[in-house]
Amino acid sequence: MAREHITDVLIAGAGPVGLSAAAELRRRGVACRIVDRLPARLPYAKAVGIQPRTMEIWDRMGLVRTVLEAAVPMRGQLIHVNGSEAARIELALPPEVPYGFAALPQYETERILEEYVAGLDTRVERGTELLSFTQDAEGVTARLGSDAGGDEEVRCRFLIGCDGAHSTVRKGLGLSFEGGAFAEEYMLADVVADWDLPHGYGVRASHVGDDGSTDDLLVCIPLPGAGRYRMSMLVPPELSAGAADGAEVAHGLEGGRVPELADIQAVVDRLAPRPAALSGMRWASVFRISHRIVDRYDKGRVFVAGDAAHIHPPTGAQGMNTGIQDACNLAWKVALVVRGEAGSALLTSYDAERRPVGEEVVGRTVRHATRGIENDSDDMETLMLREAQLLVGYRDSPLAGAPAGPDDAPQPGDRAPDCAGLTTPVATYPLRLLDVLRGLTGHVLLLYAEKHADIEAWDAGEAGGLHTVAVVGRNCPPDTPAYRDAGGEFARLYRPDGPTGFIVRPDGHLGARFPLAGTAKAVSGCFAALSDPAR
């Protein structure tokens, strides 16, 4: 006899990744519980960089305004070597990208996400730890331990491990976590610096010895608050936590002696491009860095995401953002399966799509950590788009439809570009495509034609229940009952080849591209892929 499920999904870990998974599940009506062994959020500004792609995801969720009010802009990075400026990187993106780079302390990101999830009637169960789990054909049985005492057995359909580098879920699945560790230890501190460096710029100052190796390093990332930075630097011998235990993953904050303000000031005095008096230290710690990735992101009804699946140097602020996108990629698929709108085979596409992304991020951040981002072989425009995570795509996914249209046009699997300048007969201001898609949780059928008659000729019954958005050319009359591409930006970015349709997935990637005459076939193919990606 099948056992009753207490909840649809159990999420282990209430960091930014676990909270993102909960948010995306709950806004799709999926019941979930999210547990975390810590009694409260940690007050540490660990992951601070927010990438433009993450901002787009938060925009779709209706969360971005809160983030914009709390974050500060990241405009660039000043790179100094042996006391001289070696490079100045401007974090510039094409004008059609709606958001720039930003910085926000991790504790603020967690607060915002936790409040959002609470607004969806789900609260983090703190002081509650996943101890073990088993799974069968019908679900997962998990054992939870609570600070209040006693164990609880939870039955759920799926388990998502967002429980960090030392993940209980990853270990319980028996996944490998191949990679290595950097020998260096680092100090991390949240301080105020009184200096005259330009606002919104990070600093990377290093000393390179005669043999070409870096023997001293200081990295400063601006935080909200006048003159406040998160600083990281090599640890002096007297603060070393000692050799790492080879049996355990050496990644994250370490125990032992906590650095004092004078320890941080000493490094700033040696390396900072301007003299700076430090004050207002909120916290400091010693930490280590490893680079590892699992051999698979799922096994049966259990999944790993974020640091439980991949860890790497913090260069370029890729880790948390990659984990958030893991969560979003997985959540909409789990939601469709839970609601019976897709077959369980859909969930195999999570590993197929996200593990290649994790592998690329691990490799790139290791290269940047050892050689410097300024030595990347990509041209600067490509480098910035990649760092912004706007080039993440799934063209090789089993869910991606066949390529169509011009070779340089967005193809199935690519990020669906945002575009500005859409007008309607009613709104007296131009809209962005993100404005039109905000709050939607399912697939969207996006139709384009130069003439409204071409869209009117299309049979709306072919939409298969998908939310439909019609866009017409800029030469159509302003009172046309559709979104008018008044600025021509949609046509420029999507490169339609005559009357063209697109299916936009719930995570903002293209699922299909097709001529309007082939809409019925494309829609049925999309639904078939959701039921059987390996068709």
Image (cartoon, rainbow, N blue to C red):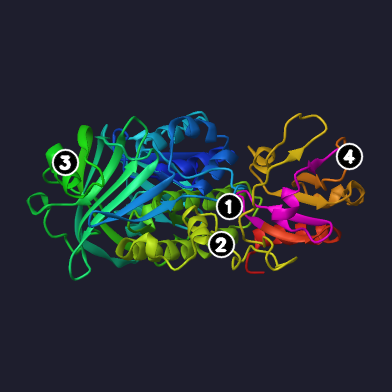
Residue 312: percent from left, percent from top: 34, 59
Q: Name the element at disc 2.
A: helix
Q: CA distance from mark 2 to mark 4?
A: 43 Å
- Does residue 334 appear to the left or right of 16 in the view shown? right
Going 85% across and 49% down the picture, which residue do you hit? 461
Seen from the viewer's position, the closer of residues 44 and 343 is: 44
Going 89% across and 39% down the picture, which residue do you hit? 477
Q: Is residue 22 magenta?
A: no
Q: Which residue is mark 4?
A: 477
- Tell me if mark 2 has few (under 14), some (14-19) or many (20+) residues whose alpha carbon lies within 10 angstroms of its own: many
Q: Name the element at disc 4.
A: loop
Residue 195: percent from left, percent from top: 27, 36
Tell me whether the residue at label 2 lies in contact with that at label 1, contact meaning CB atoms closer than 8 angstroms. yes
Q: Which residue is mark 2?
A: 349
Magenta region:
481-510
Q: Which residue is mark 3?
A: 265
Q: Earlier in the sequence, mark 2 or mark 1?
A: 1
Q: CA distance from mark 3 to mark 4?
A: 64 Å
Q: Name the element at disc 1.
A: helix
Tell me whether the residue at label 2 lies in contact with that at label 3, contact meaning CB atoms closer than 8 angstroms. no
Going 76% across and 48% down the picture, which residue do you hit? 488
Q: Which residue is mark 1?
A: 333
Seen from the viewer's position, the closer of residues 268 and 330 is: 268
